[in-house]
Image (tube, rainbow, N blue to C red):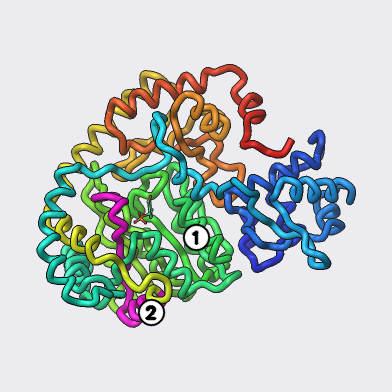
């Protein structure tokens, strides 16, 4: 099953692979400039990795059906603008131009401004919640300072608390099955690092959480997408993909899926578990959003649907980021204890262990039941966003998600990327649907709109988005104001 969505091979990009990522050059004037710009954007998006060798000019010319001179001009322009470097006798390699940042980090490096930030579906934490947790953690920290403080598996008391939460949610768990990590993303990276080898296939939902997709690209894995549509997953497609592609790993977000908000029905979970078992695939189940259940009971842990004795190839990822605060950087994974030991060794090689203070604060937060208040706030914010969209953008449609942190809106025409760009001029940051796609150029009719900000900010954001949408000549003007590309 080929993946045309992005380059995740080894150190060389094939001509066919690159051509598959690029727009059809027929009719583009001048073609070399459009092609060079498209390659630069794929590099900034992380869809083409840095430090990989670009195809030989002649091969790319044949794959794109353009002249060799055109490809020479493309490569010259890429070199001039810093997106490529040539090494004597060893071809042309992708590079990051001076002063540019990859898109995955660029949005974290911006100076604070007055724009309403809808790029992150993650709530802030009430100040008093943190104050109380710090007060509870301080005396415990004093005790810990009498030790060396390294805990590669996580603080024993936090492992026990996380295990107990799984058990309470319907999946008997012991602390030895838990590894505390610096967030869900860290947990995923550890798993990909231990179990994935360059070129291995990984089944992913399309759309999916972009930072997870980025981690897969960096691990040089080949994504095999299965669709998540307005009606959710199609278990038959997931089963046949597992059967035919026999991927080494599969990454799923079955609870209030980011970005669509869907919950995978219980009987589909059993089917996926059985199919993954048959294909020998490691299932990596991201339950970061599982507790953000706004209208339905929180789903039971995915692994609870496995037949007894059939949980060996399932890894569950969880996090404090959605229930409490992303800035804590505390998450975990649940896996067979032998695998936890291997993953702990992997983590020692990267960071030795998580910060004791952060974990004590996490422990104090888990001991308090602050979730009902958080869910109430999110329900009010979701209602405010729904009302504001009805008022300002009544032709946008969406399914009201039963939980999670965002709407996956259909904006009626494929202008999400230019709209997101234009919205910056109107003081709103937002991600277009294509950012969540495994393949470029899809979900252009979608916007993910988080409801993690206070109602007033959401109302203002909707009004500003409507103004941006109504601004003249949306598509062409935005294309002209694309990131500062070479002249
Ligand atoms: C599905 C999913 N997984 C993982 C993460 C990252 O979580 P963490 O902050 O714990 O690394 C997010 C955050 O947006 C997410 O939505």
Is 235 drawn above or below residue 337 in the view shown? Answer: above
- From this viewpoint, is residue 305 visible? no
Q: Residue at x 57, y 31 (%)?
A: 418
Q: Nearer the viewer, residue 32 or 7?
A: 32
Q: Looking at the image, which residue is at 59% across and 23% down?
A: 474
Dot placed on the residue nearer the N-terminal end, 1 or 2: 1
Please tell me the numbered disc located at residue 215.
Answer: 1
Q: Position of residue 77 (x, y in %)?
A: 78, 45
For numbered disc 2, what is the local secondary structure?
helix
Alpha carbon of mark 1 to alpha carbon of mark 2: how far? 19 Å
Main secondary-structure element of the magenta-colored stretch? helix
Q: To which residue does mark 2 refer? A: 345
Out of 172 and 266, give the one closest to the viewer: 172
Q: Is residue 470 magenta?
A: no
Specify the segment rendered in magenta: 321-346
Position of the N terminus by quadrant: bottom right
Q: Residue at x 21, y 66 (%)?
A: 162
Place residue 24 in its image quadrant. top right
């Amino acid at each position: 099953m080929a993946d045309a969505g992005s380059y995740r091979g080894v150190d060389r990009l094939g001509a066919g692979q690159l051509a598959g990522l690029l727009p059809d050059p027929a009719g583009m004037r001048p073609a070399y400039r459009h092609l060079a710009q498209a390659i630069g954007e794929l590099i900034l998006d992380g869809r083409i990795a840095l430090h990989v060798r670009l195809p030989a000019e002649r091969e790319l010319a044949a794959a794109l059906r353009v002249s060799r001179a055109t490809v020479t001009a493309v490569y010259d322009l890429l070199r001039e603008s810093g997106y490529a470097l040539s090494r004597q006798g060893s071809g042309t390699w992708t590079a990051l131009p001076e002063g540019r940042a990859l898109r995955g980090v660029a949005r974290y490096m911006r100076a604070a401004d007055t724009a309403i930030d809808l790029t992150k579906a993650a709530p802030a934490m009430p100040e008093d919640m943190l104050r109380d947790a710090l007060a509870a953690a301080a005396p415990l920290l004093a005790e810990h300072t009498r030790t060396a403080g390294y805990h590669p598996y996580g603080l024993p008391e936090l492992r026990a608390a996380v295990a107990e939460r799984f058990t309470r949610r319907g999946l008997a768990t012991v602390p030895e099955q838990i590894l505390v990590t610096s967030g869900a993303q860290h947990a995923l990276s550890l798993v990909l690092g231990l179990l994935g080898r360059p070129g291995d296939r990984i089944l992913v939902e399309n759309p999916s959480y972009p930072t997870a997709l980025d981690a897969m690209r960096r691990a040089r894995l080949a994504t095999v997408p299965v669709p998540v549509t307005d009606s959710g997953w199609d278990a038959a497609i997931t089963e046949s993909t597992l059967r035919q592609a026999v991927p080494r790993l599969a990454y799923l977000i079955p609870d209030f899926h980011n970005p669509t908000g869907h919950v995978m029905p219980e009987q589909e979970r059993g089917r996926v578990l059985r199919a993954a078992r048959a294909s020998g695939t490691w299932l990596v189940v991201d339950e970061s959003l599982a507790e953000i259940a706004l209208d339905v009971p929180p789903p039971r842990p995915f692994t609870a649907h496995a037949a007894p004795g059939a949980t060996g190839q399932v890894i569950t990822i969880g996090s404090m980021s959605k229930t409490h605060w992303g800035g804590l950087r505390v998450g975990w994974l649940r896996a067979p204890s032998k695998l936890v030991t291997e993953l702990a060794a992997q983590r020692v090689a990267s960071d030795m262990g998580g910060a004791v203070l952060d974990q004590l604060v996490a422990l104090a937060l888990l001991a308090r039941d602050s979730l009902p208040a958080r869910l109430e706030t999110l329900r009010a914010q979701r209602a405010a966003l729904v009302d504001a969209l009805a008022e300002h953008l009544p032709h946008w449609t969406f399914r009201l998600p039963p939980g999670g942190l965002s709407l996956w809106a259909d904006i009626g025409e494929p202008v999400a990327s230019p709209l997101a760009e234009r919205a910056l001029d109107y003081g709103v940051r937002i991600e277009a649907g294509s950012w969540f796609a495994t393949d470029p150029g899809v979900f252009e009719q979608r916007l993910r709109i988080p409801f993690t900000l206070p109602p007033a900010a959401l109302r203002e954001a909707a009004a500003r988005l409507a103004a941006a949408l109504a601004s003249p000549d949306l598509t062409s003007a935005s294309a002209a104001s694309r990131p500062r590309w070479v002249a």
